[in-house]
Image: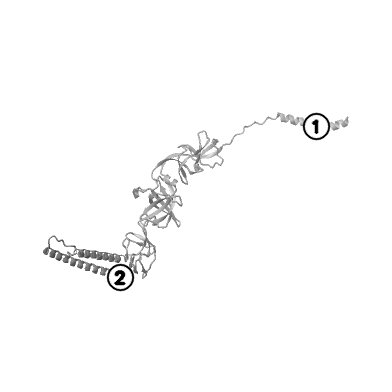
């Protein structure tokens, strides 16, 4: 009996402990069950607004002179004078003497031409006098019904003398022109791009002496895409009715550590698409770039590469929203009144670094998403967060 109790006692203790633990577990209150809550995605939103805007586009171009010519002599000779204004980069005024070719031979040719005119004039007067004498003789010795010939009345000789006089006068005009062409004077204010000759050098007719350009107006040829042309509302082949009525262009460039700005106007648009680049070129003009149009003393110099901001021709109604709202070129995420996401396709008018203008797809007052959203689905519920407090 003792042996049986000794074996069964531990089993009884273990069973009792197990029953006590089960009883305590059964008496513990059950944990409160909570339903799983869906966590909404929080997104920053901005309100789209309607505005009357003038669209502008940005492009670049190189400043070129409107008038640039090579100085080419029409006569030959040795250069006997060079102006200080005829050096690379120098400025000259209209009518300034830039260069002079030795005119000795042309002075002599002028004297000979004047003598030829005098001689031809004398011969004409002699033939006219002879004509008068022969006409008088014919009247005194007139025969019945017989008409004199032009030669017998000296009319042919007079015509020949008149032709010789005209030829001599033409040679005289040519001699005077050649003498004038030994001096180089230009009808505009300008600057010298480069000079190719020196004093004492013999030059021939047709040889290039240098290159000069006018400083009254410079041009900038600006490349535009067809979309940019539509944004500006400018037709191909456009010609400005007047300089003051042309679209404004704001030019800018960095020189050293300074920023400079100038203003010009679009005066024409090419009537054809460039076959190589498939672009359309608009030409802007800036008047008096080395004078009144200079900025802080800096002219809009020829050869300068500038950025251009072109203003549109007229205002148009558009929906304005932050640039961050535009996705994949023509998509916008809109949060409706039920805080659900709608993926809209919009008609983009223009974009810049800060804003986008659209013609349709979004209405004024709607909330557009500006946050990054990798996996957007149409109809998903979201939580909008306004960057600024709504009024």
Quarter the N terminus occupies: top right
Residue 41: percent from left, percent from top = 56, 38
Residue placed most toward the observer, 144 or 235: 144
Regarding residue 25, the answer to whether it shows in the image is yes
Regarding residue 391, the answer to whether it shows in the image is no
Q: Is residue 13 above or below residue 166?
A: above
Distance from Cα at disc 2 to Cα at disc 1: 146 Å
Image-quadrant location for residue 135? bottom left
Q: Which residue is mark 1?
A: 13
Residue placed most toward the observer, 147 or 133: 147
Image-quadrant location for residue 177? bottom left
Q: Residues within 10 Å of mark 2 (few under 14, many from 20)?
A: few
Tell me the tag on residue 66. Answer: none
Q: Is residue 328 above or below residue 157?
A: above
Is 3 left or right of 371, judged from the image as shown? right
Of all residues, the one furthest to the left in this rendering is 140
Is 158 left or right of 17, judged from the image as shown? left
Q: Is residue 136 above or below residue 375?
A: below
Of all residues, the one furthest to the front in this rendering is 144
Q: Secondary structure at mark 2?
A: helix
Query: Which residue is found at the position 78% from the left and 30% from the top?
Result: 16
Residue placed most toward the observer, 93 or 118: 118
* Labels 2 and 1 touching (C-beta < 8 A): no
Image-quadrant location for residue 196? bottom left
Point out the tag, 2 or 1, that comes first from the N-terminus. Answer: 1
Q: Residues within 10 Å of mark 1 (few under 14, many from 20)?
A: few
Residue 313: percent from left, percent from top = 38, 45
Residue 46: percent from left, percent from top = 49, 40
Q: How many numbered dots are placed on residues in this image? A: 2
Q: Nearer the viewer, mark 2 or mark 1?
A: 2
Q: Which residue is mark 2?
A: 105
Q: Secondary structure at mark 1?
A: helix
């Amino acid at each position: 009996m003792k042996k049986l109790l000794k074996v069964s006692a531990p089993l009884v203790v273990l069973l009792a402990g197990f029953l006590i633990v089960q009883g305590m577990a059964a008496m513990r209150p059950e944990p409160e069950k909570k339903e799983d809550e869906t966590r909404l995605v929080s997104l920053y939103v901005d309100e789209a607004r309607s505005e009357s805007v003038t669209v502008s586009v940005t492009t670049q171009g190189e400043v070129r002179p409107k008038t640039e010519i090579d100085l080419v002599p029409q006569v030959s000779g040795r250069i006997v004078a060079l102006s200080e204004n005829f050096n690379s980069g120098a400025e000259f005024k209209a009518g300034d003497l830039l260069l002079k070719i030795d005119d000795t031979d042309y002075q002599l040719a002028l004297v000979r031409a004047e003598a030829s005119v005098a001689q031809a004039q004398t011969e004409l007067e002699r033939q006219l006098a002879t004509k008068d004498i022969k006409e008088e003789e014919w009247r005194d010795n007139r025969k019945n019904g017989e008409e004199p010939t032009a030669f017998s009345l000296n009319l042919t000789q007079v015509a020949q003398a008149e032709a010789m006089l005209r030829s001599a006068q033409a040679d005289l005009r040519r001699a005077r022109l050649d003498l004038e062409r030994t001096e180089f004077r230009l009808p505009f204010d300008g600057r010298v791009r480069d000079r190719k000759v020196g004093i004492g050098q013999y030059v021939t007719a047709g040889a290039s002496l240098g290159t000069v350009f006018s400083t009254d107006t410079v041009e900038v040829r600006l490349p535009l895409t067809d979309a940019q042309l539509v944004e500006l509302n400018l037709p191909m082949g456009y010609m400005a009715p007047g300089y003051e009525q042309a679209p404004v262009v704001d030019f800018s460039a960095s020189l050293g550590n300074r920023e400079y700005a100038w203003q010009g106007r679009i005066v024409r648009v090419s009537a054809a698409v460039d076959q190589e680049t498939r672009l359309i070129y608009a030409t802007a003009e800036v008047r008096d770039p080395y004078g009144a149009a200079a900025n802080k003393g800096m002219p809009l110099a020829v050869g300068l590469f500038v950025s251009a901001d072109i203003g549109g021709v007229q205002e148009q109604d558009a929906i304005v929203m932050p640039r961050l709202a535009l996705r994949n070129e023509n998509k916008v995420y809109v949060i409706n009144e039920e805080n659900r996401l709608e993926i809209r396709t919009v008609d983009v008018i223009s974009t810049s670094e800060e804003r986008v203008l659209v013609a349709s797809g979004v209405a004024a007052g709607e909330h557009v998403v500006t946050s990054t959203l990798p996996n957007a689905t149409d109809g998903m519920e979201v939580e909008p967060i306004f960057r600024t407090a709504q009024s």
